[in-house]
């Protein structure tokens, strides 16, 4: 038998900058500035961790969205989804661009009024509206979006007592090919529930049916679903006209447009898969214009986009606390940003990026937050540069939902900054204080001496 050739073993240097099989660079990019302001300067002044919001980014994104729709359909109105980010400064930026308010609780309603929005520019959604909430909304002429028949009867009684006509719209859930279907909200279209409710509203002395509304879900990348929903609502509007000789004033397609974040388990990054505002607008407006809606009496098209308008404008800045080896040999980096500040890390593969170039070397790393709970994981496994304690990191694209769903768990919430169009920094929410937090508690007399 012939002896096998000897091959000398070699060590192959893995070049971190090489493209992967999708042609994408595996190099970890660095973000050192936000809107030309150096992150190092911001952190020196305000500490770590903290949130930063870019006003120029909000305005730019809003204008793109507005233009995408307004260039295709004559009557378009955005209503800012408060629950996506209800920091007053953020809402005010949207309102200054012309957005109305879309609220889902009495608390948000009060915020919208205090942010200078008049009742007739507030869309009041959600399954819970108290007696006081509804009375106020009736008086203010807000658009009350009915969620159930119980709410319909309750509102009817209140409007009658006040001897006022309530402005209402009906929230409709429908099959547009998006699963799981959010059929817990509003009235179902396909089983006839929505049509029944509309008839009741039309015959009610103290209600005026202004609009038809659906909000199908969130992070919907299938633009076709919007075309189907728009067509179904347009048909419903036509049916209403045939029976009652009356047109609805608006069709509201809710929110749900995806942002460029990458969902966990997604094959390609969100930056590649996220439809543009033009894609959504084309689908929706084509369906409306091709429907039997009368050209001389087109309803106002309302959009309640949240996530897609604000995600890109938010940044989290933080620092490395420690590096460790897990027992299986994996590298772990602990940072001072936990899931309490980054609720969306349960759904998204957020980028965690260095704020300055250290080395080209990266290693497969698990990134943990600082909380004493096992699920406080920011990234399960990511190629990450070898940062040391004290090095700073930035997590971009966190503007949606993180500043409303944040949890007060073992720590106080950090401050929130806004960078304005002149690159000036404003503190728009102070760091929470121990005193503030404790002031809400009360110790019963018998425990005071303990
Ligand atoms: C949450 C919500 C929105 C905003 O949804 P996004 O997915 O963030 O665009 C709009 N309308 C209603 C009724 C909502 O509940």
Image (tube, helix red, strand yellow):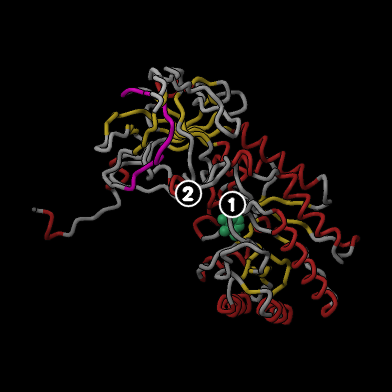
Q: Quadrant of residue 61?
A: top right
Q: Is residue 237 left or right of residue 81?
A: right
Say above or below: 263 vs 110. above
Q: Pick whichever, 380 or 407, lies toward us.
A: 380
Q: Position of residue 354 (x, y in %)?
A: 44, 25
**Count of numbered labels shown in the rendering:** 2
Q: Residues within 10 Å of mark 1 (few under 14, many from 20)?
A: some
Is residue 101 visible in the rendered image? The answer is no
Magenta residues? 375-389
- Ligand 1 position by quadrant: bottom right
Q: Which mark is residue 384?
A: none
> Residue 276 placed where, x, y %?
70, 43
Q: Main secondary structure of the magenta part?
A: strand
Name the residue furthest front. 1
- For disc 1, the marked residue is 219
Q: Where does the N terminus fall, quadrant-wise?
A: top left
Is label 1's Cβ within 8 Å of ligand 1?
yes
Report the residue at 32% width, 32% height from top: 331
Q: Is residue 227 above or below residue 260?
A: below
From the top left corner, tell me how far across and down residue 365 is, in percent: 37, 33
Name the spot of residue 401 as percent of width and height, x first.
50, 48
Q: Secondary structure at mark 1?
A: loop
Q: Earlier in the sequence, mark 1 or mark 2?
A: 1
According to the picture, the residue beneath numbered tag 2 turns out to be 347
**Point 81% across, 75% down: residue:** 239
């Amino acid at each position: 038998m012939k002896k096998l050739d000897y091959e000398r073993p070699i060590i192959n240097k893995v070049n971190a900058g090489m493209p992967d099989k999708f042609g994408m660079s595996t190099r970890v990019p660095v973000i050192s500035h936000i809107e030309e302001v150096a992150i190092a300067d911001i952190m020196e002044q305000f500490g770590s961790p903290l949130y930063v919001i870019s006003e120029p980014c909000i305005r730019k994104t809003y204008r793109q969205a507005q233009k995408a729709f307004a260039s295709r359909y004559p009557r378009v109105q955005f209503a800012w989804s408060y629950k996506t980010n209800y920091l007053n400064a953020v809402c005010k930026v949207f309102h200054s661009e012309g957005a109305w308010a879309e609220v889902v609780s009495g608390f948000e309603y009060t915020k919208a009024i205090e942010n200078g929005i008049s009742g007739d520019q507030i869309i009041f959604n959600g399954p819970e509206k108290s007696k006081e909430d509804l009375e106020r909304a009736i008086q203010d002429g807000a658009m009350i979006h009915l969620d159930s028949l119980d709410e319909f009867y309750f509102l009817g009684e209140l409007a009658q007592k006040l001897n006022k006509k309530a402005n209402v719209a009906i929230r409709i859930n429908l099959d547009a090919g998006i699963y799981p279907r959010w059929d817990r909200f509003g009235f179902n279209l396909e089983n006839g529930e929505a049509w029944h409710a509309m008839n009741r509203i039309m015959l009610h002395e103290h209600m005026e049916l202004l609009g038809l509304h659906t909000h199908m879900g969130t992070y919907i990348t299938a633009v076709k679903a919007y075309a189907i929903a728009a067509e179904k609502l347009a048909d419903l509007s036509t049916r209403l006209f045939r029976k009652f000789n009356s047109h609805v004033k608006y069709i509201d397609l809710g929110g749900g447009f995806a942002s460029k974040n990458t969902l966990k388990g997604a094959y390609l990054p969100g930056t590649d898969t996220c439809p543009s505002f033009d894609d959504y607008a084309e689908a929706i407006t084509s369906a409306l214009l091709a429907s039997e809606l009368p050209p001389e009496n087109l309803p106002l098209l309302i959009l309640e986009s949240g996530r897609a308008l604000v995600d890109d404008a938010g940044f989290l800045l933080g620092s490395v606390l420690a590096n460790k080896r897990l027992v299986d040999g994996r590298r772990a980096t602990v940072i001072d940003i936990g899931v309490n500040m980054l609720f969306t890390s349960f759904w998204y593969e957020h980028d965690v990026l260095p704020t300055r170039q250290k080395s080209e070397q990266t290693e497969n790393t698990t990134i943990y937050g600082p909380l004493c709970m096992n699920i406080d994981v920011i990234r399960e496994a990511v190629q990450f540069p070898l940062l040391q304690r004290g090095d700073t990191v930035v997590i971009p694209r966190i503007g949606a939902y993180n500043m409303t769903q944040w949890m007060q768990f073992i720590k106080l919430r950090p401050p929130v900054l806004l960078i304005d169009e002149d690159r000036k920094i404003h503190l728009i929410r102070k760091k929470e204080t121990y005193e503030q937090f404790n002031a809400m508690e009360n110790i019963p007399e018998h425990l005071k001496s303990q």
